C-alpha cells in the first residue's frame, strides 16, 4: 500500500472553506463546491511565508478562492477524543441562544459539513481541531459522532489555516483577533506568519501588542468578546493600565463582582469606568492662591506627574520660591520617612 502524500494547506482547506462555514452557520445547508482552478499551489502557505508580505497576501487570496472537492475521506470520531486547537481564536458568546439554535440544527438535520482534525502531537489516540469548534462542541453536547477529515498539518500550517477561515468571518471581534495574535506570539510564531494568518499589516500587529502586552489574557477573557468595543477603546484601556499597573488589581476585583448575565460590552464599560476616574481626577487644574485669595499658580496632577504653572502677577515669583524650597521639602520628606519607620 502506498503512503498517502502529506496534504498541503490547499488540500486541507478542502470542503471546509469559509464560504461553507458561513453557509453552515446560517442554514446548515452545504454550499456548492467551487471547481478547482489552475494548478495546485505547490509549496502552499509555508513556502509563501518565506517570501515578501505582498506575496504572502497574494497566496492567501488564492487559497481563499480555491475549494477543492474530495479533500479527504470523511470519518466519524468520538468527540470526547478530540481537543480544541492549541490556538483558540474565539471567546464565549454572550448569548447562548444562537449556539443552541445551531446545535438544534445539527440534531435535526445532521452535520452537513465535516470538521477538520489532526492527530494530537503529544497525546496518542487523541486529535486536535483545526477548525470547526462549534460543530465539535455541538456534537459533544448531543452525544453524537463527529464527522471529520483528518489531515497532517504543522502548528504553523494550523494557525494559517485558521487565519484563512477567519479572514472572511464578520463576527470575530477586534479583541478576539488580538488574542489570537497573542497566542501565536507566545508560541514563537514569527510576525510575518501572524500577518498572513490574520490578514494584517505590521502597524496593526503593533496596536494589538500594545493591548495584549499590557492587559493580561485572564482579564481579556474575563471581559469577553465585547462586540461593540473596537480597537480605539481597547487601546484606551491599555493606555490607562500602562499609566498605573496597580489598576490591574482593581480590574480583577471589579470583574469578580459583575453579574454573570451581564454582557461583555457592559463588563468592558464597567472596567473602564472603574479605572478611568483615577486617571481623570488630576486632569482639571487646581488653583493655588495665597491667604488673601490672590492667584499664584495652577496645579495639575497625574499618577506619575505634577505640573505647576504660573498664574497672576505673582506667579513667576511663586514658581521661583517653590524651586528654591524643593531641597528643603526633600529633606523634610526623608526626615518624616525615618520617623515613620518602626
Image (cartoon, grey):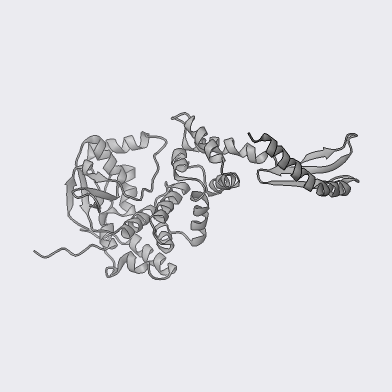
Q: Nearer the viewer, residue 338 or 327?
A: 338
Q: Determine if residue 283 is in view.
A: no
Which of the 4 image quarters holds residue 13?
bottom left
Q: Is residue 95 above or below residue 206?
A: above
Horizontal side, residue 183 vs residue 299: left or right: left
- Identify the residue shown where x is 47% and y is 39%: 223
- Identify the residue shown where x is 18% and y is 51%: 74
Horizontal side, residue 200 vs residue 313: left or right: left
Query: x, y (%) of residue 326?
Result: 78, 47
Horizontal side, residue 265 vs residue 88: left or right: right
- Identify the residue shown where x is 52% and y is 38%: 268
Q: Determine if residue 133 is in view.
A: yes
- Figure quadrant of the N terminus: bottom left
Query: x, y (%) of residue 29?
Result: 27, 46
Query: x, y (%) of residue 70?
Result: 20, 58
Residue that protrudes farthest toward the front in the picture: 342
Amino acid at each position: 500500500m502506498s503512503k498517502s502524500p502529506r496534504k498541503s494547506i490547499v488540500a486541507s482547506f478542502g470542503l471546509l472553506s469559509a464560504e461553507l462555514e458561513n453557509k453552515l452557520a446560517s442554514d446548515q445547508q452545504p454550499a456548492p463546491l467551487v471547481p478547482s482552478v489552475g494548478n495546485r499551489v505547490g509549496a502552499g502557505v509555508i513556502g509563501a511565508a518565506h517570501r515578501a508580505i505582498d506575496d504572502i497576501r497574494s497566496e492567501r487570496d488564492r487559497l481563499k478562492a480555491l475549494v477543492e472537492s474530495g479533500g479527504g475521506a470523511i470519518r466519524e470520531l468520538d468527540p470526547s477524543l478530540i481537543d480544541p486547537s492549541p490556538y483558540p481564536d474565539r471567546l464565549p458568546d454572550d448569548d447562548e441562544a444562537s449556539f443552541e439554535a445551531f446545535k438544534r440544527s445539527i440534531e435535526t438535520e445532521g452535520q452537513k459539513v465535516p470538521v477538520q482534525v489532526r492527530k494530537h502531537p503529544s497525546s496518542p489516540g487523541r486529535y486536535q481541531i483545526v477548525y470547526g469548534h462549534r460543530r465539535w462542541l455541538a456534537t459533544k453536547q448531543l452525544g453524537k459522532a463527529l464527522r471529520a477529515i483528518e489531515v497532517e498539518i504543522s502548528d504553523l500550517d494550523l494557525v494559517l489555516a485558521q487565519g484563512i477561515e477567519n479572514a472572511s468571518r464578520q463576527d470575530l471581534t477586534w479583541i478576539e483577533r488580538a488574542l489570537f495574535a497573542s497566542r501565536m506570539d507566545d508560541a514563537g510564531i514569527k510576525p510575518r506568519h501572524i500577518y498572513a494568518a490574520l490578514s494584517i499589516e505590521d502597524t496593526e500587529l503593533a496596536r494589538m501588542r500594545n493591548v495584549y502586552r499590557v492587559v493580561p489574557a485572564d482579564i481579556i477573557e474575563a471581559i469577553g468578546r465585547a462586540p461593540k468595543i473596537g480597537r480605539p477603546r481597547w487601546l484606551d484601556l491599555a493606555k490607562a493600565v500602562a499609566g498605573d499597573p496597580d489598576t490591574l488589581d482593581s480590574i480583577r476585583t471589579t470583574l469578580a463582582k459583575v453579574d454573570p448575565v451581564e454582557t461583555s460590552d457592559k463588563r468592558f464599560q464597567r472596567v473602564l469606568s472603574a479605572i478611568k476616574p483615577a486617571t481623570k481626577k488630576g486632569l482639571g487644574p487646581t488653583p493655588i492662591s495665597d491667604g488673601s485669595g490672590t492667584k499664584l499658580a495652577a496645579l495639575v496632577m497625574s499618577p506619575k506627574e505634577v505640573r505647576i504653572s504660573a498664574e497672576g502677577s505673582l506667579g513667576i515669583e511663586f514658581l521661583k520660591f517653590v524651586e528654591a524650597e524643593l531641597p528643603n521639602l526633600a529633606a523634610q520628606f526623608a526626615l518624616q520617612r525615618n520617623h515613620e519607620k518602626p
